[in-house]
C-alpha cells in the first residue's frame, strides 16, 4: 500500500503523515527534508542557488544523517529549499530515491508536494492537506520562535505566500492537488481532529479499492 500526502507548508501535513505511517506500520519519507538538506548543504558550501549542476550533484550525494532537524527547519532553509526545488536537475536527482522508497516491498507513505502527481501517481491513497495562509503563518511563526528565530508573524505569512507561488508555478512538477486526492482542510481543526479526518479518508479510499 502506498499513501501519498501532499499539501502546503505548515498545513499539518507532516504531523498527519507521521501519525498515519505509525497507524498503518508504513515506512515514512518526508520528501521536503531532501530539498531542505540540499539547500542547507549549498548554503554551507557556498554553492549559488542558481548553479543547477552543482546543486544536482549535492542532491545525488545526500546523507540525511549529516543534518540536524533544527538547521533544516529554519526560515532560511525553507526559503532556499523552495528555490532549489524548482530546478529540474535537482528534482530529477532526487526522483529515483523517492520512487524507490515508494515502491519498496510492503508499501510506504510519502509526504511532499508532488507525491500523488509525479512520484507515486499510482498511490492507493492520495491526500491534499491545506489551510488558510494566515493560520499556516501563525503555526510556522510559533515553530520558528521555538527554534529561537526572531521573525515577525507578518514576515512569515508573506514568506508562505511567496513559497506557495514558487511551488505552484514552477515549470517542473508544480505543487498541485491530484485529481483523485481527498482534501483535508485543517484551518479550524486541532491536530487530533485533522488526523482523525485523514484516517477516515484513508479508510474510505482503501475500502473503494478493497484494501485493508
Image (tube, rainbow, N blue to C red):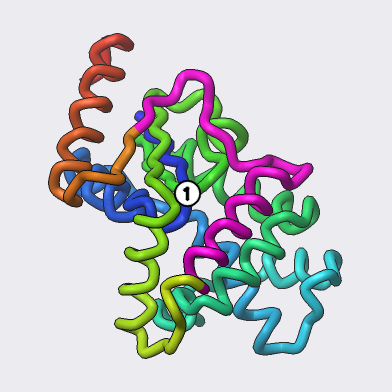
Instruction: Pinpoint residue 25: horizontal percent, then vertical percent.
Output: 22, 43
Residue under label 1 = 8
- Residue 69 placed where, x, y %? 40, 77
Viewer-side residue, 104 vs 146: 146
Q: Residue at x 76, y 88 (%)?
A: 46
Which residue is at the front of the view, 73 or 206?
73
Residue 191 shows in the view: yes
| Residue numbers of the magenta segment | 155-183
From the top left corner, tell me how far across and down residue 93 is, in percent: 71, 55
From the viewer's perspective, is 52 left or right of 182?
right
* 39 in relation to 47, above or below: above
**Quadrant where the image shows the N terminus:** top left
Q: Quadrant of residue 201?
A: top left
Q: Residue at x 38, y 41 (%)?
A: 129
Image coordinates for residue 83, horizontal then vertical, percent: 70, 64
Left or right relative to 98: residue 104: left
| Residue depicted at x 70% and y 79% | 42
Q: Is residue 9 magenta?
A: no
Whether residue 174 is in magenta: the answer is yes
The structure residue drawn at horizontal position 26% and vertical position 27%, both measured from the top left corner, is: 202
Residue furthest out toward the front: 154
Q: Secondary structure at mark 1?
A: loop
In the rendered image of this protein, does residue 99 appear above or below residue 190? above
> Can you tell which quarter of the image residue 153 is in?
bottom left
For the question of whether residue 62 can be seen, the reply is no
Question: Crowding near pointer 1: few (<14 within 10 Å), some, many (20+)?
Answer: many
Amino acid at each position: 500500500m502506498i499513501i501519498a500526502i501532499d499539501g502546503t507548508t505548515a498545513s499539518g501535513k507532516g504531523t498527519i503523515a507521521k501519525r498515519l505511517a505509525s497507524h498503518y506500520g508504513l515506512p515514512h519519507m518526508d520528501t521536503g527534508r531532501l530539498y531542505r538538506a540540499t539547500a542547507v548543504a549549498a548554503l554551507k558550501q557556498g554553492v549559488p542557488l542558481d548553479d543547477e549542476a552543482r546543486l544536482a550533484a549535492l542532491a545525488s550525494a545526500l546523507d540525511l544523517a549529516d543534518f540536524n532537524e533544527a538547521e533544516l527547519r529554519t526560515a532560511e532553509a525553507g526559503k532556499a529549499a523552495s528555490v532549489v526545488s524548482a530546478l529540474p536537475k535537482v528534482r530529477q536527482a532526487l526522483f529515483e530515491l523517492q520512487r524507490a522508497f515508494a515502491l519498496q516491498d510492503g508499501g510506504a507513505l510519502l509526504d511532499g508536494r508532488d507525491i500523488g502527481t509525479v512520484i507515486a501517481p499510482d498511490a492507493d491513497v492520495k491526500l491534499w492537506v491545506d489551510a488558510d495562509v494566515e493560520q499556516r503563518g501563525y503555526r510556522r511563526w510559533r515553530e520558528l520562535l521555538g527554534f529561537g528565530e526572531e521573525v515577525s508573524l507578518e514576515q512569515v505569512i508573506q514568506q508562505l505566500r511567496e513559497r506557495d507561488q514558487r511551488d505552484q508555478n514552477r515549470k517542473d512538477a508544480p505543487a498541485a492537488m491530484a485529481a483523485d486526492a481527498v482534501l483535508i482542510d485543517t484551518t479550524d481543526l486541532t491536530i487530533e481532529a485533522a488526523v482523525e479526518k485523514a484516517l477516515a479518508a484513508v479508510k474510505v479510499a482503501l475500502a473503494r479499492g478493497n484494501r485493508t
